Amino acid sequence: MNQKIPINRLILLGNGFDLAHGLKTTYNDFIIWYLVQAMEKASMHLEYKDGLMTINCPHFYAINSLYNQGLDKVPDFVNYFYHHGFSHMISEAGLKFQGWQNIYQNPFKFNLRSDLLSTLLTSCSNANWVDIENTFYDKLKDVLKHENPQQKEKEIADLNQSFQIIIYMLEAYLSTLDGSTNVAGYETIINSCFEPDEFVGLTNEDVNGTIDQTMILNFNYTSTIRNYVDDQTNDQSRITLNYIHGKLGDEKNRPIFGFGDELDQDYASFELAKTKGIFEYIKSFWYFKTSNYHNLIRFIDSAPYQIYILGHSCGLSDRTMLNMVFENNNCKSIKIFYHQNEHFNNYTPLTQEIARHFKDKQDMRRKIVPFDKSSPMPQVLLDQ
């Protein structure tokens, strides 16, 4: 009789997990918060200034004329332009509101000193989700097209400085959120047993009936997962929590922002370039600051494992790492917990994103658990 082998589980925890708990953790949510707090300070002190922009508010009384339309408060004002385009709000032209005949004086005068912020603001809207890390990477690639070395270094220095300020602001925003909500269903998912029909080529006769070791790879900077798992290894449940991208408020494991697709065909030009600062916010070089990445490698090399995807978009900004865990020979199954509402579920878009990280497409089709054996993510709204 063959000896049964242990099987592990690797849970990829992404921003969708926080969203399922009711936290407003998208980049759009952050940009709205940033604008509101900046414009409110400008309205109180006539001016707001940081390293990205200056907002003057010499005519705040002008917003009073919008009282009858319910736009005389800064959050309502920002929310209107979130739905109609921030480009109109930050321009010097008079304000024209949909369905209104009059043109109104803009009480806020914006001076944007960051090309990165300008791009993010003009891209951010209710109909378009911005991705700060991908936008930053695209900007880096554009800078490398310049022929003048001094111009390259200056623009990269400016871009890195803008990104650093945005990171600081984003950390401040995320620190204001309350992730203490517990949603029924996640504890069961985390502690669920081995299911033979989620694997091709493995049965109960081959492996133990329970999961041996679990690593939760937390890509979030928040600690929402602590509602279900302690920060430290739990010897009884054999669950390890790995804050692979850092943790808010942890000086020994600072949040990691940037781009992590070294498989991108344009990345080779970064390594050939002699421009200073080009690697400042490439994630790989930040991973060396802790043992988290090595702990991940040890885990995936130690035994066969199944991947659970809980709220991770599987986007290209983490492609190098995702390719490593998906195509590892020990990876035997990838189960998607998809977002679902009454009109839509994102199972198929997620499979398309996952496919980008596979060079071997046959291996990909063998590993992804079919839709009829997959499950939706529990959502906080279902408990209210």
Image (tube, rainbow, N blue to C red):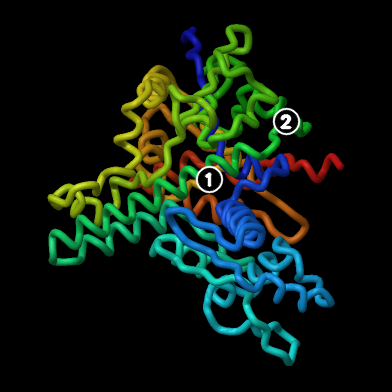
Residue at (29, 35) in percent of width and height:
285
Q: Quadrant of residue 195?
A: top right
Say above or below: 102 vs 289. Answer: below
Q: Nearer the viewer, mark 1 or mark 2?
A: 1
* Label 2 element class: loop
Q: Position of residue 225 (x, y in %)?
A: 63, 28
295 sits to left or right of 28: left
Residue located beneath label 1 in the image: 170
Residue located beneath label 2 in the image: 180
Residue at (33, 44) in percent of width and height:
281
Q: Position of residue 85 (x, y in %)?
A: 59, 73
Which quadrant of the rendered structure holds the C terminus?
Answer: top right
Residue at (74, 42) in percent of width and height:
379
Amino acid at pointer 1: Leu
Q: Position of residue 337 (x, y in %)?
A: 63, 41
Amino acid at pointer 2: Ser
Nearer to me, 23 or 102 = 102
Q: Quadrant of residue 20?
A: top right
Does the rendering let one see residue 140? yes
* Label 1 element class: helix
Nearer to me, 116 or 180 = 116
Disc nearer the start of the sequence (1/2)? 1
